[in-house]
Image (cartoon, grey):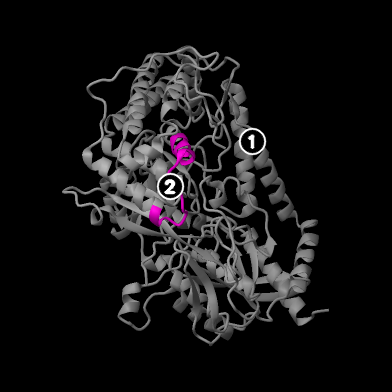
Amino acid sequence: MRKYLITLVPVLMLSLQPGPQAGMSAVPLPPPSADDLKPSVSQEHVEQLVARLLTTHHYRKVRLNDSLSSVVFDNYLKELDGNKAYFLASDVNSFEKYRNNIDDQLINGELTAAYDIYNVFRKRYQERNKFVQENFVKPFDFTVDETFNTDREKANWPKSIEEQNDLWRKLLKNQSLELKLTGKADTSVVNSMKSRYKNLDRYMNRIKAEDVFQIYMNSFAESLDPHTNYMSPRSADRFNQEMSASLEGIGALLQEDGDYIKISDIVPGGPAFKSKLLTKGDKIVGVAQGEGGQIVNIVGYQVDDAVKLIKGPKGTTVRLQIQSNDAIAGAPPKEIRLVREKIKLEEQRAKKEVIEVTQNQKKYKLGVITIPVFYRDFEGARKREEGFASTTGDVQKFLNELKAEKVDGVVVDLRDNGGGSLTEAITLTGLFISRGPVVQVKEAQGDIEVQTDPDPSIIYDGPLAVMVNRFSASASEIFAAAIQDYKRGLIVGSQTYGKGTVQTMVDLNTWLKESEKVGQVKMTIAKFYRINGSSTQHKGVTPDIELPSAFSAEEYGESSQPSALPWDQIASARFDVTRSLDDKIITKIRERYEQRLKSDTDMKQLMADFAELKRAKEKTVVSLQESKRKKERDDAEKRRKSISASAGEPVATNDSTTPAKDPKDAKAPKKDLYLDECGKLLADYIAFTKNPQ
């Protein structure tokens, strides 16, 4: 069996003439200097090898041509200057000579484009750093009525130094105002901003040729799909350490995202996971130790330096300033407190509870099994140890207990479950169906393998609902899709992530005999398909009953990635649909749900809050006048608290003097609105099954 690594998570054609465009002031390119970064011979060899591997063995069969070259060119500029703040329009125009020949450079092991463009970026950065230092001699005047557009993605690069200076004046003023609104004095704001840019300067000065090469190669790799990337030797070592290290601290994996430290994943069972105060994509902008420690601004930090501040002895408190991934323009960072602890694997395991739901004046007793991740002790399984840790083993025990407790139905909660063991997704499905196919895997060569549950026994054949959301991915989607295709249970929630691809790790030193380490490539080599032939890629799983969600497919999930592999379909596997659920019952359940929405105060409020949040996020222009900005901030905070309260989530404070409350301290548990609604839907399912009329 091949070893798979299952992980989460319009090109504008410009003139090829290197001269200035119409209306553009030509600004000379910075001249070459002795400290310019240069490629090594080893990197040139690696470039050729990676280009050959990805065009030969990647699932997406691509040709190195001018079209792909143009995409890589745009990706590279975006990676270096996504906010269009450093390069000038004349710089970008001068780079156009590389747009259609990067493909040739990849084939020939040439890195001229990569380093020429980066060295210009480096010099423009140095110019901006000088501008920053000159502009922080006194506080900004926040009484002036002016605005700043925080969304620079569709903006143009500045056409002149004067235009760039004005952009940076507003950018710095906006950042300073964010700090001032947290209660900092003017002198403290100035010092904090100076510290922030000193950190950034320290980071930039530590960038080596190895880092430039990794950025460039990922601009190529990620043009094939978002889960394919190149890791430099240092990054590969860090990745391997994360995979094998003892899980201690707050339970979050971090990565650099421009000037910020971003949460790339949250470990089930850790402090971050249990607090529900952090989500993937949140950015950490400040760290403080204990209850009274001073906040250290970490914008511009490298991830290694950030980790040193965030990790600490078990039982100690760390305070984090967070910029939420769904924050609207102008929203202030929130402050949270977490107690560090060693993450026990038991905390990642499935849990069981029994809830009561009253529907149509009748009480229903429901079992809820929450699965944070699909786990399996592969070593214990290999040695055939009795009772080795596995998702299927734990859930089987829970189902037997719930049957003994005579529950009316069972909910399997897969919200925020990012995947894990494919084997467990298959065997877990087998607890609810007789033997049969569960998933199809199509490899790059076109071979299709149907993976089945071989066990004819069924552990639980009663009413079943599966809860999913936008962050249910990979193995979660395989299980939910199989339950849906067999019509074995009701799928409730929001459209899942859509991560239907399989990756493998390639150690480049096994292909390239270099005396030094040359890194690794993570490459997509296969796709998952449902037993009905539909891919889980891109589309994910659409629930039978969709609940309101704040996370749109355009912003979150696989479909938000421009290079995501497309959805497609293969032949259906042969399988027998169960008689647990039919389309008529699903229609009746949906009709009753829609009727309930008209009168359910909580759900109506949640839908209204989500609609308001969507409108607010579309407004990217913020005021740079203190009084107006404070009102914008206060309005945004009210909306955030309203939505968190409606959804039954803990709320982190933005007031650094007030501790964020631990959910355990609440006198009464917060209502899980989604679980409550899922319980009502399952109750309807039970009622309609017993009385089809």
Percent from the top left, x then y, of residue 67? 49, 39
- Seen in the picture, residue 62 relative to 349 is either above or below; the reply is above
Percent from the top left, x then y, of residue 267? 41, 57
Q: Residue furthest right?
A: 693
The N terminus: image quadrant: bottom left
Q: Does the CB distance between marks 1 and 2 fall below 8 Å? A: no
In magenta segment, residue 63: yes
In magenta segment, residue 466: no
Residue that appears at 35% across and 33% down? 114
Q: Nearer the viewer, residue 111 or 540?
A: 111
The C terminus: image quadrant: bottom right
Look at label 2 and name its amino acid: Ile
Residue that appears at 75% across and 82% down? 690
Look at label 1 and name its amino acid: Glu
**Pointer 1 or 2: first along the chain:** 2
- Seen in the picture, residue 540 relative to 367 is either above or below; the reply is above
Q: Which residue is mark 2?
A: 263
Tell me, for residue 152, which label it has, or none.
none
Residue that appears at 59% across and 68% down? 533
Q: Which residue is mark 1?
A: 618
Badge 2 marks a residue whose secondary structure is strand
Figure quadrant of residue 544: bottom right
Residue 675 visible within the image: yes
Q: Nearer the viewer, residue 248 or 655?
A: 248
Q: With 208 as the anchor, is 658 left or right in this view?
A: right
| Mark 2 surroundings within 10 Å by alpha-carbon count, few (fewer than 14), some (14 through 19), many (20 or more) | many
Badge 1 marks a residue whose secondary structure is loop
The span picked out in magenta is: 56-74
Q: Residue furthest bottom?
A: 457
Disc 1 to disc 2, C-alpha distance: 23 Å
Residue that appears at 72% across and 74% down? 685
Percent from the top left, x then y, of residue 277? 49, 50
